[in-house]
Image (cartoon, rainbow, N blue to C red):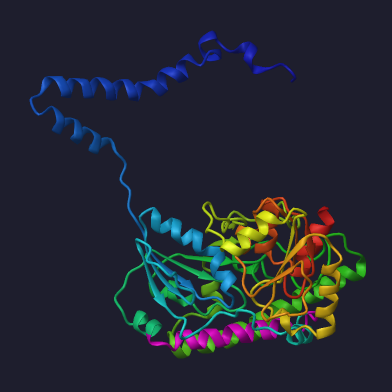
Amino acid sequence: HLRPASVSLPLYQYLLLDVIILLLSPFLIFFCLAKFIFYKTEMKSLNLVLLCLLLARSAGSARILVMQVSVSKSHSAIMEPLFEELAARGHQLTVYTSSPHKFAIPNMREIDLSHNWRPVVSNFSLDFIKQVMPDPFRTPFPMADLELLMCENVLSGHQIQSLLVSDSKFDLVITETFTVDCFVPLARKFQAPLISFVTSNILPWGSDRVGLPDNPAYIPNYLSNLSTNMTLFQRIYNSVVLTFAKFVQQYYAISQSQNLVSKYVNSSNPPLSELVANTSLLFVNSHFSLGISRPVTSNVVEIGGIHMKKKYSKLPKDLQQILDQSSQGVIVVSFGSMIRISSLPRHMISMFLQAFSTVSQTIIFKYEDDLPEAPPNVVIRKWIPQQEIIGHKNVKAFLNHGGMGSIIEAVYYSKPMIGIPLYADQYLNVKALATRG
C-alpha cells in the first residue's frame, strides 16, 4: 500500500507524547529522589554522592599485550596511534616492540627488542626487488623468509622467554599479521582474545582467518596486478595465483612457523592454523574509497588513516624555509622506508635528475646518499618527515611507490599523485587508484 501509516495514528502517538513521557520519567524520578535526599537529611552531600555512585555505570581498564615487531619501521608507525590512544584511555599496555618511543608514555610499558630485530629501513636493493617481486610465484618465499628470521630472533630472546614463564595476566593480545603468525600462540598462553592487524591491504592468505570472501572471479589478488574487470584468461591467472599463494602460506610459511613455535613457545600447542583461526578481530590499513569494492565481514575493520597525526611535529628549519619560499610549489619524491632507491643504476638516477631539472618546482627527494650532480631545484634528504611535508600548502604533487600509508596521506591532504609501484600490494594499490581516477 502507498498509504502512509501516519494517517491512522492517534494524535498522542503522532506527536510522540508517549515516547517523550517514557524517556523523561527516569530523569524526573532521579531529580525528585535527589531533591528529597538533599533537603531531608543532615548528611546532604554524602547522600547525594552515594546516590550518584549507585546510579553510575562501572568502567574498568584492560591489560593488553601488544607484539609490535614488524619487518618495516613504517608498519610500526601505522599502529602507534591506536596503542597511544588505548593508553590515554586508561588501559594498561605491555608492548614488545622493535621501534620503541623516545619518551615514556603513561600506562604503556615498552620492552625494547631492537637488539633482537631491527626493522628493515632502506635495506632492499632494487636488484632484489627485480628478482622476486614482479613474479607472484616467487614473491611469497622471500617475504616469509624475512619474517621467519625475525620470529626466530625475537622468540629465542630472553625477553619473550621470560614472558612465557611469567605469571602475567592479559585481557587481550594484539599482533601484526603479514606472512607469518609466530606470536599468535601468546593469545592461547594467556587465555585472551586475539586481535590482529595488517598494515597493507588484506593479504591473499589473510581472508581465511576471518572468513572473508575472496572470489577470484572479481576480486584481484594482492600479487596478480589485475583490476576488477578481468578477462577469462585473467580470471584463470588470478585463480591460479590465489591458490598458489594460499598453498605456500599453509605448507611453507605456517609449517616453518610451527617449527619455531614448537621450539621456543610450546610444543603441545594446537596446530598454528587452528590458533590463527581463533582471531576475533582484524584491523586492515585500507579504506573502501581507495581500493577495490569487495564484501567485508563484521570482524574486519578498515582503519586506513589512523596514523594521520592530529598534532604535527615542527619541521626542521631548513625544510620549513624551503617549503615556505618555493613560489612555484614543491614536488615530493619518496619511495618508502624499505627500498634503497640509491641502488638504482646510475643511468636511471641520471634520468630522474634530468626530468627533475625540467620543471620549475622545487623537488624534495628522499635519497640515501649524496648526489652532488643534482640540479639546483632538487633538495636531497636521507630522511624526511613525510606527513608534515605533504600537508604543507605549497606541495603540488607527490611521487611515491604506492604504499598504502603514502596514498592515504596524499588523499587526506588532496595532493595529486604519481605512482611507481615496486613490490607487494603497491601494484594493486596504484591500479585501483588509476581505475577510480
Q: Hey, which residue is sitting farthest top in the picture? A: 11
Relative vertical location of residue 268 with respect to residue 8 in this rendering, above or below: below
The answer to which image quadrant residue 301 occupies is bottom right
Left-right relation of 323 to 11: right
Q: Which percent across, then down, holds residue 147?
A: 59, 82
Residue 277 visible within the image? no
Left-right relation of 301 to 125: left
The answer to which image quadrant residue 111 occupies is bottom left
Q: Which percent across, then down, holds residue 21?
A: 41, 17
Q: Which residues are magenta?
A: 134-158
Left-right relation of 437 to 62: right
Left-right relation of 153 to 318: left
Q: Nearer the viewer, residue 165 or 3?
A: 165
Q: Nearer the viewer, residue 8 or 120?
A: 120
Residue 116 visible within the image? yes
Q: Which percent across, then down, holds residue 405?
A: 65, 63
Residue at the image point whose x is 46% and y is 85% from the top: 115
Q: Main secondary structure of the magenta part?
A: helix
Residue at the image point whose x is 51% and y is 53% from the top: 311
The answer to which image quadrant residue 158 occupies is bottom left
